[in-house]
Amino acid sequence: MQKEASIREPLILGHKTYHDITEDVCRSIEGKAPKTWYVIFGVALILGLFGIGCILYLLGTGIGTWGLNKTVQWAWDITNFVWWVGIGHAGTLISAVLLLFRQKWRMAINRAAEAMTIFAVFMAGLFPLIHMGRLWVGYWVMPIPNQFGSLWVNFNSPLLWDVFAISTYLSVGFVFWYIGLLPDFATIRDRAKNPVSKKMYSILSFGWSGRAKHWNRFEIVSLVLAGLATPLVFSVHSIVSFDFATSVIPGWHTTIFPPYFVAGAVFSGFAMVQTIMLVVRKGLKLEAYLHVKHIEYMNIVIMVTGSIVGVAYLTELFMSWYSGVEYESYAFINRATGPYWWAYAAMMTCNVVSPQLMWFKKLRRSLLFTFFISIVVNIGMWFERFVIIVTSLHQDYLPSSWSMFHPTWVDIGIYIGTIGLFFVFYLAFARYFPILPIAELKTILKSSGESYKNDTAPGRNKPVPALAAAAAAVQEVVAPVAEIETPKVEAPEVDVVIPPVETLKSTAKPASETVSAEEKENRISSLIEKLGKGSADSKDDLKLISGVGPKLEGTLNDIGIYTFEQVSKMSKAEYDLLDSITGTFPGRAERDNWAEQAKTLMNK
């Protein structure tokens, strides 16, 4: 296990054990959903259904229901498409790139970020399909041999590159996300009491048993997928930027778009992760696993990528002047001073000014401020895409064709609908899937857990009772010897005889003998009162519990513990009480988690 520097803040707060991690993450799945979950889910579902209704109306009536015209032929639809793709960018970065760099803090947010990626790409994919006007012929964008004469895709078009880039991104992202869920699905399967839930999670876990072979393959596949996904972090939004950069329209025809779009995508993606995870953290009581340190790390990424985006804005302005092309210069002057100046001002304020506030440590560690800024950033990134698309189109080379774009209720309805559908998917995910990676969090508990870093974890630095008794006996024998004064030269020699080791061993008493019979009986009575009385006639085979052998089973039976049900009620207090009674193998019951094993055996 890698030892982490004590100066680093812990990533898991509190006196958490492996069992606590499982309980905390599974609580939202195994328990009842709170009323607020149903309220938010209901609102999101209504918005999603309204959006679906708008899409059906659009398909039945035509693209004319949007606010497009002959001059502005791309507007809200493509703005929303690029915005959703950008939001989905953080998941791959967190999952793949941070995994390859072995960043432990990613483990608290990677599962939620991966899910966000998948759902955001779903929403993004809707807009190009709708923009075709005939959703049912969407398969024409694929290079499929057909009988339609000259119908074939144009491989020189960046719009076709979009199809391949986003479908690949979605496929790799989904597989990466699902592979990480397998061990956790198996954990929920083993804990499930409802037969339907047990069957469902059994299917989802693909027969995961936790064998060394499974873990080995899990690690290999995760690294391979991370290697495949890392280029996608840079390629997907670069290809999306080619939709604009390969054209000859002033304001679009620039080589800075690929890195500029990638930085903007990571910028907006991390902001959305912040927005969602701060709500989830509070709603699911996961403050111990997602806390100020994680927020600060993400805010640093937002600050850096926001600064890159700001430099890109300034570079665009400089190049429009330095190029000497009056059309290019006018495109940027029009953005800042033309009829859409308010959109440009919102973009610059939200994307350039607000991230710079993260230089102040107090602000970037403030949860309330972070939540506010995360929303501001995504508003600003939406305006960025709107400014790039609409302001570059609405006033072209021919002044007589200049026009303004005004969104219709269908434009707005479809956009709001996609937000509703996104949260419907996400809320369902948070309710039925483990939102934090149980297995991965356990791998960092002993290196980054607060109690382990401070040496206050249960069972650490506590003297073993039997050894303590032996040490006391040794001290009792050796103490008189230490008190003998050192003889002077003229005095006769004194022979000091130190007892042999066997004598010391014989004088050491086991911990159980150091407790009076009456005290021991009181402890046994107290333990049985907490666990409940068992009967020898209906006793279970306690040897099925890992760590319990024939001798220890006999000891437990002598105490009055016969059944799995009694063992399943044990907690920290009962474990310590049992250790004080038996005096053998202290800490074993807690370490091997007998209670959890007993619950599993009860369900079989």
Image (tube, rainbow, N blue to C red):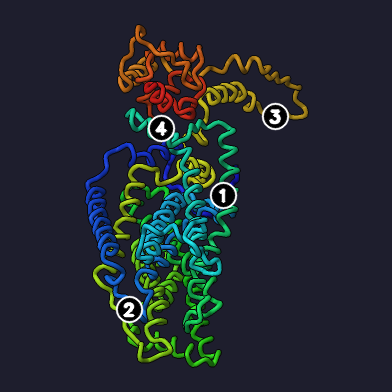
Q: Nearer the viewer, mark 4 or mark 1?
A: 1
Which three-letter amino acid code belongs to the residue tagged 2?
Asn
Q: Nearer the viewer, mark 3 or mark 4?
A: 4
Residue on which the image places disc 1: 225
Which three-letter amino acid code belongs to the residue tagged 1?
Leu
In 3D space, how far apart are the residues under numbered discs 2 and 1 (Cα atoms)? Answer: 44 Å
Choose top left, top right, bottom left or bottom right for residue 385.
bottom left
Depth check, front residue: 136 or 343:
136
Mark 3 falls on what kind of element?
loop
Say whether residue 240 is visible. Answer: yes
Say whether residue 297 is visible. Answer: no
Residue on which the image places disc 4: 189
**Residue 110: x %, y % from top left:** 47, 51
Q: Nearer the viewer, mark 2 or mark 1?
A: 2
In 3D space, how far apart are the residues under numbered discs 4 and 1 (Cα atoms)? Answer: 25 Å
Spot the residue most to the right.
490
Residue on which the image places disc 3: 486
In 3D space, how far apart are the residues under numbered discs 3 and 4 (Cα atoms)? Answer: 70 Å
Discs 2, 1 touching: Cβ within 8 Å: no
Discs 3, 4 touching: Cβ within 8 Å: no
For label 2, the crowd category at 10 Å Cα-Cα, with few meaning under 14, some 14 to 19 and many 20 or more, is some
Which residue is found at the position 49% from the left and 62% from the top?
Answer: 149
Which three-letter amino acid code belongs to the residue tagged 3?
Thr
Quadrant in which the N terminus is drawn: top right
Which residue is found at the position 34% from the left and 33% from the top?
Answer: 197
Residue on which the image places disc 2: 69
Mark 1 falls on what kind of element?
helix
Which three-letter amino acid code belongs to the residue tagged 4?
Arg
Mark 4 falls on what kind of element?
helix
